[in-house]
Image: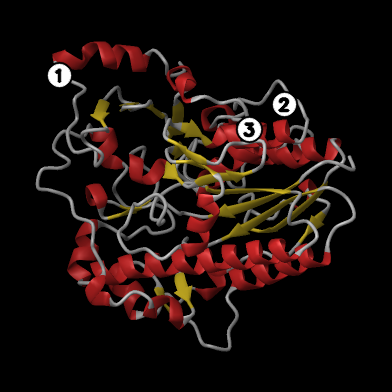
Amino acid sequence: MSGARNVLVLCIDDLNDWTGYLGGYPGVQTPDMDALAAESTAYQRAYCSAPACLPSRASVIWNRRADATGLDAQDAAVRDGATYASLVSDIETSLPGQMAALGYETISAGKVTHEVEAQLWDVVGPTAAIRDLRDETSAAYRSSGYDYGPIPDDRPHPDQLVADWASDLLVQGRGQPFLCMIGMSQPHVPWRLPAWNFEQYPLDDVVVPTSPPGDLDDVPPAGLELIGPSPGTPDVTDERIEASGRRAEVVRAYLAATTHTDAMVGQILDALARSRHADDTTVVLWSDHGFHLGEKLHWGKRTVWERATRVPFLIRDPDLKAGDIEAPVSLLDLAPTVLDLAGGTPPPSWDGRSLVDFDESQAADRPALMFWEGHRSIRSEQWRYTRYADGGEELYALDADPDELTNLADEAAHADTVARLAGQLPA
């Protein structure tokens, strides 16, 4: 193990493609993630297995599709259930369990799994309890359903405490190869942040996403159900956001939270660069799912459209060629890639495949799959096809229609494409 590379994994919560390097929002300030992307294999079209925190994180850590874990449902319905408890007890086939078997020290801080699953790790640092920042008496929350605003100057942000701990750990150094997974909780709500984050985005400069009239006219009924109120933000609807007059404020708050996380990423990477581990550490960055900010008249996650499922995914490692990968990949490929780079062999229960030898010519044979409440969606190089639990279908030609405005599923000219993509979905 003396020559083994360390692995630092930075896990981000609720971050969509609003980074500079992905170009999802004009003017977003993410210099540290952009700098990492310039040195990394940057998977430009990476997708989660499920568009919510617990199911997505479980699918990454235990490397099983969300439909296979039985966790492709709302967080509240599964968090305390026997299904998740059974999965957590399976330490051996988890990513940290597999790395520990190779002689790695396993370290976790912040939000990595959905809760603090201490039994998975050798070392556990502070959590990032941003829920403690929530102020449901605020005018923003009462009018829009979203809580956001500056925190007092003398109050440390929970993600800052995690970043400080991780930075100290890296600078102090470790005595054996390590897998260190550090989770940042923002831009998950509440968007309570230091004032400087909001000051970086003048309200008059904020670009608010819009949906054209009739955007939802060709969406099947089951798809429409997904854009209604959801757990965590039960009263947030497009109508309420519009009535509050706070559309731009909400978008600015999400941007501010994203930039705060970028600063935390930069601090940790700077500490790594100053440490004795600088030249022998692989760096991975990913987000558990995306987030709508008014696109398709939805606010939040839990849809199987691009905005809720496309995520940042970067790997900086000398055995992987730096540059952009345009073909769709799945976050299920994260753990097998890390294990492959460490010299391990994935257990039979894992669903993902290593990206070490991935060639974009393979993309047609390994499209990204997403699952949610019985709905199934597939992202190929050009298409997104979705079959809802009630049999409704969507087909979007994303090269020409990146905002998924025109559902082609019922058009005879695309019947063969629908049949081909439907045939690649699991039963």
Structural distance between the alpha carbons of marks 3 and 1:
36 Å
Closer to the chain start, of discs 1 and 2, is 2
Q: Quadrant of the N terminus?
A: top right
| Secondary element at image label 3 | loop
Q: Residue at x 37, y 57 (%)?
A: 234
Q: Residue furthest left?
A: 213
**Residue 246 seen in the figure:** no
| Secondary element at image label 2 | loop
Identify the mark at residue 276; answer none if there is no mark: none
Q: Is residue 231 left or right of residue 394?
A: right
Closer to the chain start, of discs 3 and 1, is 3
| Amino acid on which the number 1 mark rests in the picture | Glu
| Secondary element at image label 1 | loop
Check if mark 3's residue and mark 2's residue have beta carbons within 8 Å.
Answer: yes
Can you say whether 378 is above or below 41 in the image?
Answer: above
Identify the mark at residue 411; answer none if there is no mark: 1
Q: Quadrant of the C terminus?
A: top left
Q: Residues within 10 Å of mark 1 (few under 14, many from 20)?
A: few
Residue 94: % across, % down: 72, 37
Q: Residues within 10 Å of mark 3 (few under 14, many from 20)?
A: many
Q: Residue at x 35, y 73 (%)?
A: 141
| Amino acid on which the number 2 mark rests in the picture | Pro
Return the residue at label 2. 346
Return the residue at label 3. 63
Check if mark 3's residue and mark 1's residue have beta carbons within 8 Å.
Answer: no
Nearer to the camera, 228 or 408: 408
Nearer to the camera, 120 or 19: 19
Can you say whether 285 is above or below 305 in the image?
Answer: below
**Residue 180 seen in the figure:** yes
Nearer to the camera, 254 or 235: 254
Residue 232: % across, % down: 44, 58
Residue 376: % across, % down: 40, 27
